[in-house]
Image (cartoon, helix red, strand yellow):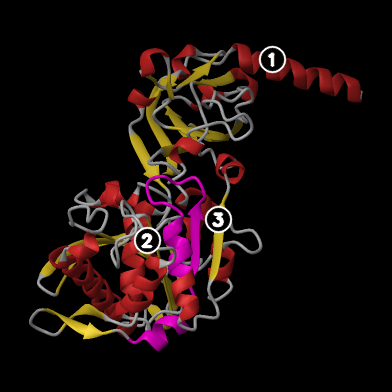
């Protein structure tokens, strides 16, 4: 009797599959997230059809995705250009007339083919070509974390800047109060760009939320010209860097006053030009922050890049002097030079990260920042230099090893900078 039952069920399933009408797609939603290298990554696609019967009997093996490459410039295992997944990792779920197709995360732009032309991704359904989908047919895109962020503008110190702010929420969707805050300093490649372009350049806003850490994350779109190498020799450029930082600090104070963030748990990080801005920010407000992570930092304090040392140790000597000198602060009317609280600056712990093969911002900058602070009494600093193999494990080749913010924002393993920061929250 049981055998007859199972045979009957199999026949019914077969009949359902055979009688499935052709699908008519009404809506295509791509569920995406921010990738590592200015990419949007697709995690899932939802197809809504007019007739739910057209989805009956479909299986994961009925679908393939082509031109679906992972994030990164290179394959971590081989160092060669990334290739499409052999196994797409497709999982299907159906809710009435909506089919959700989850897969291994792939680049929304597709892959780079012959003559370096982009070849778009395609979802192919072998059981019903009416369910075939390309990027051009997507009707709606959901962007994880950033869609839910607060976006606005803030005016202070004679300038106005746009910001994006992620705030952790409870299970009911209410904003949590008195949470830690990480403010990220953007790199020169994001200067003078629109807010969302800057926010999506890397995982600066989404890294902590993706890791499940209940911490607010903040980024301002900075309208500087890229302050470039040896900008410390140009007072007007440095005054603008410090003015931007003054504005950010004033905005953070509003978040503290409203009970949104915990003023005793403020953190700062940034990469490249943003690593240099992080250093200046800490020189301006060393007693306000709990820790900082300068990544592949530029040199807005003393000339280091594109400069030759007159003697061994000159850069470190110059920094020791600069860290005991002055920075610009807003006095209510203008940015004016004010003494650095060197003792508080050196008491503030920093974790320097840099790729050893970085040719854009050479690793010497992190070494001399670390060394100068140590000479002035800093006892809680750390430094991690990424070798080529470590960078490649995150899809970054030696040729572009300046991108050390990629491993920084992805690696929360024991002893890393992100692990170190989270443990202080």
Considering only order in the chain, which callout, 3 or 1, is on the residue closer to the N terminus?
1
Image coordinates of residue 357 in percent, x first then y, are 49, 45
Was residue 359 drawn as part of the magenta stretch in this picture?
A: yes
SS label for mark 3: strand
Mark 2 surroundings within 10 Å by alpha-carbon count, few (fewer than 14), some (14 through 19), many (20 or more): many
- Name the element at disc 1: helix
The numbered dot on residue 14 is 1
Tell which tag, 1 or 3, sits nearer the viewer. Answer: 3
Q: Which residue is mark 3?
A: 385
236 left or right of 364? left
Residue at coordinates 47% horizontally, 84% vertically from top-left? 347
User: Residue 413's quadrant in the figure?
Assistant: bottom right
In this orientation, does residue 59 appear?
no
Point out which mark residue 275 bears: 2
Residue 137 spot, x, y in % from top left: 35, 24
Whether tag 1 and tag 3 are in contact, CB under 8 A, the answer is no
Q: Residue furthest front?
A: 311
Range of magenta residues: 341-370
């Amino acid at each position: 009797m049981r055998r007859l039952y199972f045979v009957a069920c199999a026949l019914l399933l077969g009949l359902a599959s055979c009688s499935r009408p052709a699908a008519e797609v009404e809506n295509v939603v791509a569920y995406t997230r921010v990738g590592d290298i200015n990419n949007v990554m697709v995690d899932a696609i939802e197809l809504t059809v007019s007739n739910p019967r057209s989805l009956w009997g479909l299986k994961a093996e009925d679908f393939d995705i082509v031109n679906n490459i992972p994030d990164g410039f290179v394959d971590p295992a081989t160092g060669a250009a990334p290739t499409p997944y052999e196994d797409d990792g497709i999982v299907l779920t159906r809710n009435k007339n909506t089919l959700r197709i989850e897969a291994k995360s792939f680049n929304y732009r597709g892959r780079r083919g012959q003559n370096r032309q982009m070849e778009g991704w395609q979802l192919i359904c072998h059981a019903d070509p009416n369910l075939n989908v390309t990027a051009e047919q997507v009707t709606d895109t959901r962007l994880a974390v950033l869609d839910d962020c607060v976006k606005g503008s803030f005016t202070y110190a004679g300038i106005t800047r746009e910001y994006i702010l992620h705030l952790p929420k409870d299970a009911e969707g209410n904003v949590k109060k008195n949470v830690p805050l990480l403010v990220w300093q953007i790199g020169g490649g994001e200067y003078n760009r629109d807010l969302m372009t800057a926010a999506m350049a890397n995982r600066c806003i989404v890294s902590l939320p993706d890791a499940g850490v209940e911490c607010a994350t903040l980024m301002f779109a900075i309208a500087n010209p890229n302050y470039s190498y040896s900008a410390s020799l140009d007072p007007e450029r440095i005054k603008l860097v410090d003015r931007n930082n003054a504005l950010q600090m004033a905005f953070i104070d509003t978040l503290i006053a409203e009970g949104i963030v915990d003023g005793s748990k403020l953190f700062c990080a940034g990469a490249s030009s943003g690593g240099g801005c992080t250093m200046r920010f800490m020189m301006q407000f060393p007693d306000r922050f709990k820790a900082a992570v300068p990544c592949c930092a530029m040199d807005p304090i003393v000339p280091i890049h594109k400069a030759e040392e007159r003697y061994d140790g000159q850069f470190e000597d110059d920094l020791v002097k600069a860290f005991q000198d002055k920075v610009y602060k807003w006095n209510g009317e203008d940015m004016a030079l004010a003494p650095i609280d060197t003792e508080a600056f050196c008491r503030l712990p920093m974790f320097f990260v840099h790729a050893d093969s970085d040719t854009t911002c050479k690793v010497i900058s992190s070494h001399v920042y670390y060394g100068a602070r140590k000479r002035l009494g800093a006892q809680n600093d750390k430094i991690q230099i990424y070798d080529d193999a470590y960078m490649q494990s995150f899809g970054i080749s030696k040729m572009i090893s300046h991108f050390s913010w990629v491993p920084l924002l992805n690696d929360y393993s024991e002893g890393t900078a992100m692990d170190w920061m989270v443990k202080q929250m």
